[in-house]
Image (tube, rainbow, N blue to C red):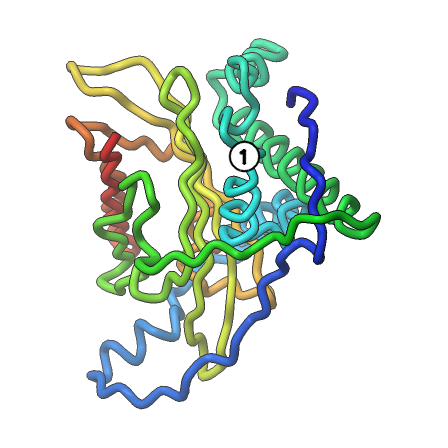
Amino acid sequence: MPTVSVPTVGGGFYTPVVPKSPAANKSSSSAQTSTTQEQTTVTQSDTATAQRAVAQAASGLGLTATDLASMDSLGLLSSGLLGGGKLNALAAAGNTSSLPSADSVILQQILEQLAELKAQVEQQNADGGAAQVVPVAVKNPAETAAGRKILRFVVNGYDVLATCRDIYFSVPETDGSFLLTGDRKYVSNGANRSETFHLLFRAKDAEDGFARYAVTAAVTQDYENEYSFLYQLAERADLMARRTGNFISLRVSDPDWKLDLLVALDD
């Protein structure tokens, strides 16, 4: 990441407080209740893989969509995630850019550098400053000021988008790659949960006339929950999204696990 001159800020970097989830007072069918608990069966092997995915995202703990939006409001992310084409430079390192694991490493490095940037801002606040960091409120949690939005996010018939509270899209890199981060609250096994997911869309060569993105997921949770759909998404490899116009779609059609994600880039 290029050296960033952090503006003088004060009053403490905004750290979101997890609000108490409202009581479940909405009527729903038994099928909806079962889905809300996100208790999709996973194998022992899948669980081990998912646990590794969570461990790999450890540096992203505490790095939420609200944090990224606040840093963006200070102009710290205006040049993209890494700036100057360094995203592709990371991908080419070691000539492993074609391997799915390479994208996981890239996402990890992005989260680490963003976490470092957040720590710099927090240190500046601790040292004292004149400006007050104001949290960025997202009126529509599925839409950013630039018009980029999630139109649909469904897993096994369950509306994940309805549980999202804040969503952040990074400034696209020169090749179109971007990071999508979301904070969500949901109910699992009768308990209120919260988690943050990170989806790295890294541009690939077009195929059949369609632009493509390799998608890599990572998730951090308040409590490790292997039944979370985002936890299970993070364990998956070889995810490929296709772009048509300003719409990007990511679909998984396994017999026991189905995903339908549709993103609009109104830029």
In the rendered image, which quarter is residue 120 located in?
A: top right
**x 38%, y 28%: residue:** 214
Task: Tell me the residue that label 1 is attached to.
Answer: 75
Residue visible at 60% across and 50% down in the picture? 63
Lateral position of residue 53 relative to residue 231, left or right: right
Q: Is residue 196 shown left or right of residue 60?
A: left
The answer to which of 247 and 123 lies nearer the viewer is 123
From the viewer's perspective, is residue 119 above or below residue 15?
above
Residue at coordinates 48% horizontally, 45% vertically from top-left?
Answer: 198
The C terminus lies in which quarter of the figure?
top left
Depth check: give the residue in front, 135 or 10. 10
Circle 1: is it few (<14), some (14-19), or many (20+) Cα within 10 Å? few
Q: Position of residue 38 (x, y in %)?
A: 38, 69
In this rendered view, identify the residue nearer to me: 54 or 173.
173
Under mark 1, the amino acid is: Gly
Left or right of residue 214: residue 249? left
In the picture shown, does residue 204 fall above or below 189?
A: above
Q: Which secondary structure lies at badge 1?
A: loop
Residue 234 location in percent, x, y?
47, 47
Q: Quadrant of the N terminus?
A: top right
